[in-house]
Image (cartoon, rainbow, N blue to C red):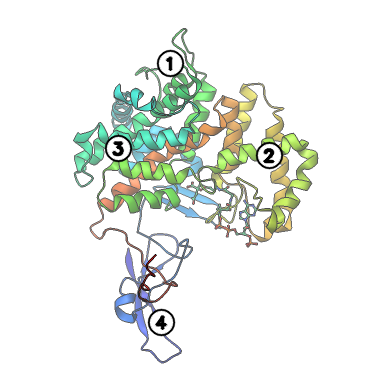
Amino acid sequence: MKLADNKATLSFSNGSPSVDLPVYHGSIGPDVIDIRKLYAQTGMFTYDPGFLSTASCQSSITYIDGDKGELLYRGYPIEQIASQCDYLDTCYLLLKGDLPDATQRADFHKLVINHTMVNEQLQFFLRGFRRDAHPMAVLTGLVGAMSAFYHDSTDINNPQHRDISAIRLIAKMPTLVAMAYKYGIGQPYMYPRNDLSYSGNFLRMMFGVPCEDYKVNPVLERALDRIFILHADHEQNASTSTVRLCGSSGTNPFAAIAAGVACLWGPAHGGANEACLNMLEDIQKMGGVAKVGEFMNQVKDKNSGVKLMGFGHRVYKNYDPRAKLMQETCNEVLAELGLEKDPLFALAKQLEKIALEDDYFVQRKLYPNVDFYSGIVQRAIGIPVNLFTGIFALARTVGWIAQLNEMISDPEYKIGRPRQLFTGSPRRDVPTMAKA
Ligand code: SDX
């Protein structure tokens, strides 16, 4: 970051001495006011619950222009990445800062594909769960449990450990997600195969059975790969900030990623795709498109507590570029599967049309986000609704790792420890307790 000529001067109406605060430029996007010395100079904290105006770090991985609806991975527009790269190219880019050349690409693909098996003991770990456990509960446990199996790569401050744990996590997440799914439906696990692509392997581990060969559908393979790309990283979102804060204590990478999985589960974040599909199904049951108006009135009624899931975003105040690409993928998959008339897809498009013309949404700059169409695509592929967020976690693992590694490699990083505005009781003494 570069010190700006400009500086911020904080003055107080009560005559307290004003304070000059340095301003820094990034390469693109808003400047920052450096408040690191504010408490020492003023005895005051800033106050920003939800961090609406707070930059928690400097990063060179992903950039979002919320007003333009632009998303860049290491400077490359998501639209170009999604159409010209595959997910493992995207992993290489996010982890190393540049796209691989042909040799680097072949080596990286081979390295990841050859690490897709998990320790056999993990299947006994799964047996502790009820068969109807939510897959995100299982995944949170399995990812955390990885730190019990890979003792040779748990030192976050060791670059070699960071490299191998990154490969292990990226390679094994599809296997773990598929195992959580198979466990829930009582089917045997399918071992990964080294002759399949990353996405093709996942499809086979999910939908293959030992009794017959599984033929990967190239359209679904490409669609899944694109879903992974679109979810790979997204600046300092809630789960990424969780991973950074968790990792800042020096804990092992598996524990930090498990914390990210747990945070992503929430319906306001990664759980929105599951919540959005459930919302569409509920409206369908109510009467479908004919009932959209009634549903939208509920959404606009503050007391209803009803939100249009898959809409709105803290940063995007324009169309989430991922939602556009997801809608395209939706069209491709539904056409491939002869589901063009999927009523939920028609319902989603009608909801989007009405929302984008409605003042409530226009005024609040609420547009479809990545979760609005992703559920429809995944459902068409055959992925159960309660596994949607597990797919999101699988794809976001590389972003979490890249951000964690960036933090650990930053000489300025220290353990995260926010302060507070205390509003509780001042010091008081425990009353003498009357003897019973
Ligand atoms: C993801 O951060 C990331 O980058 C996340 C993510 C990633 O890749 O990591 O992009 C993935 O989490 C996408 C978001 C998925 N969540 C949802 O789709 C859930 C529905 N969306 C909302 O919960 C909400 O839009 C958030 C949580 C996404 C953003 O909330 P903010 O930024 O805190 O905004 P807000 O709640 O203050 O909303 C501003 C106004 C409020 O109305 P007023 O109080 O001003 O009258 O907009 C309203 C909100 O009530 N509003 C909605 C709405 N989202 C916001 N009203 C109806 N439906 C919605 N979905």
Report, in whole angstroms, how far the alpha carbon at label 2 lies from the one at label 3.
36 Å
Residue visible at 33% across and 76% down?
39
Report, in whole angstroms, how far the alpha carbon at label 2 lies from the one at label 1.
35 Å
Q: Quadrant of the C terminus?
A: bottom left
Label 3: state its secondary structure.
Answer: helix
Residue behind mark 2: 348
Q: Are marks 2 and 3 in contact (CB under 8 Å)?
A: no
In front: mark 1 or mark 3? 1
Three-letter amino acid code at disc 2?
Ala
Tag 1 or tag 4, which sits nearer the N-term?
Answer: 4
Residue behind mark 3: 166
Residue behind mark 4: 10
Tag 2 or tag 4, which sits nearer the N-term?
Answer: 4
For the residue pair 187 and 234, the one nearer the viewer reads as 187
Q: Is residue 401 visible?
A: no
Q: Position of residue 18 (x, y in %)?
A: 37, 86
Residue visible at 42% across and 74% down?
425
Q: Is mark 1 within 8 Å of ligand 1?
A: no
Label 1: state its secondary structure.
Answer: loop
Three-letter amino acid code at disc 3?
Ala
Residue behind mark 1: 188
Label 2: state its secondary structure.
Answer: helix
Tag 3 or tag 1, which sits nearer the N-term?
Answer: 3
Q: Is residue 406 visible?
A: yes
Residue visible at 31% across and 39% down?
254
